[in-house]
Amino acid sequence: MKFPELKIGNLVPKLPIVQGGMAVRISTAPLAAAVAEEGGIGLIAATGMSIDELKSEIARARDLTKGIIGINIMFAATQFANLIKAAIEEGIDLIVTGAGFSRDIFSWGRIAGVPIVPIVSTAKLAQLSEKLGAAAVVVEGKEAGGHLGTCESVKDIVPRVKQAVKIPVIAAGGIINGADINEAFALGADGVQMGTRFVASKESNASEEFKKMYLEAKPEDVVIIESPVGLPGRSILNTFVKRLFSGENLKPNQCDNCLKKCSRRFCILRALIRSQQGDTVNGLVFSGERVGEIKDILPVKDIINNLVREMEKA
């Protein structure tokens, strides 16, 4: 089967599939490298990492593959600029950024020769991104996991963005199988970004308890919370979220100032770290809208082979 060509700057992956960058420490070197090794684009989630840790993860990924490795980072992070500069120094291939919008990042990327790919949810922001020098845009709909920028479906947004810009458009949100990928291409997307499916992989750095919640999730378990970042977020209902919904005081006793702006309703960094490390009772488990359709934890190689077969069958 011949796939659409996804060209981001001078980068052309064998497969037009980008693995989403899931923080904190869900998307690390083993996952990103495994996806890159199979012909996709692997992303390391930089948010929540130290400078040295990020550099180490990039170097580790380089040892595991010669494929395309990028980072994903939230603009809302206090260390946003420092982490980007560290990734550039380490020779990262591309940078994907969301949870806010930076104008400065485009000049940093242009000077370093590193493609910048912002995550957008409107045609207007996609046009601004193109004007500032974006190499591509990830168009994320309401179906995505983690922080959300819209209440609209990716199926409605992608065609509008495709008409508005000339740069590649990468669809994200609710893409679980090969049929979904084909549908995204039919809507005009040049590529897809998939997060939730790759969390449920052997190479994902999520704890076994975290992955188990994915396998056991029912549609009614997938809920929307208000993140201290100032954006809604999609997660799986658990004890922590129930406490949040009940209005319990979850304000942290001390703050690491990991975000530029934070409501301090609860510490999202610590909540995400707890679940990543296995405490899914007191942690936050982000997921996409269709997590309940995932029924197995597979190696990345098998996931991608299955996606290709499903695309051909569809």
Image (cartoon, grey):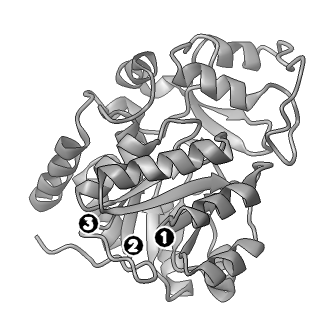
- Please state if 93 lies on the left or on the right of 285 as rendered: left
271 or 55, nearer to the observer: 55
Write the residue at 68% across / 55% down.
Answer: 83
For residue 89, say whether it is visible.
yes
Contact? badges 1 and 2 (CB < 8 Å): yes
**Tag in front: 2 or 3:** 3
Residue under numbered circle 1: 158
**Taking 226 as reference, is 313 above or below it?**
below
**Which mark is on residue 15?**
3
Name the quadrant containing residue 130.
bottom right
Q: Secondary structure at mark 3?
A: loop
Write the residue at 22% across / 50% down.
Answer: 304
Q: Position of residue 308 (x, y in %)?
A: 16, 56
Q: CA distance from mark 3 to mark 1?
A: 19 Å
**Which mark is on residue 189?**
2
Residue type at the position of mark 3: Leu
Residue type at the position of mark 1: Val
Q: Position of residue 57 (x, y in %)?
A: 49, 46
Q: CA distance from mark 2 to mark 3?
A: 13 Å
Name the quadrant containing residue 69.
bottom left
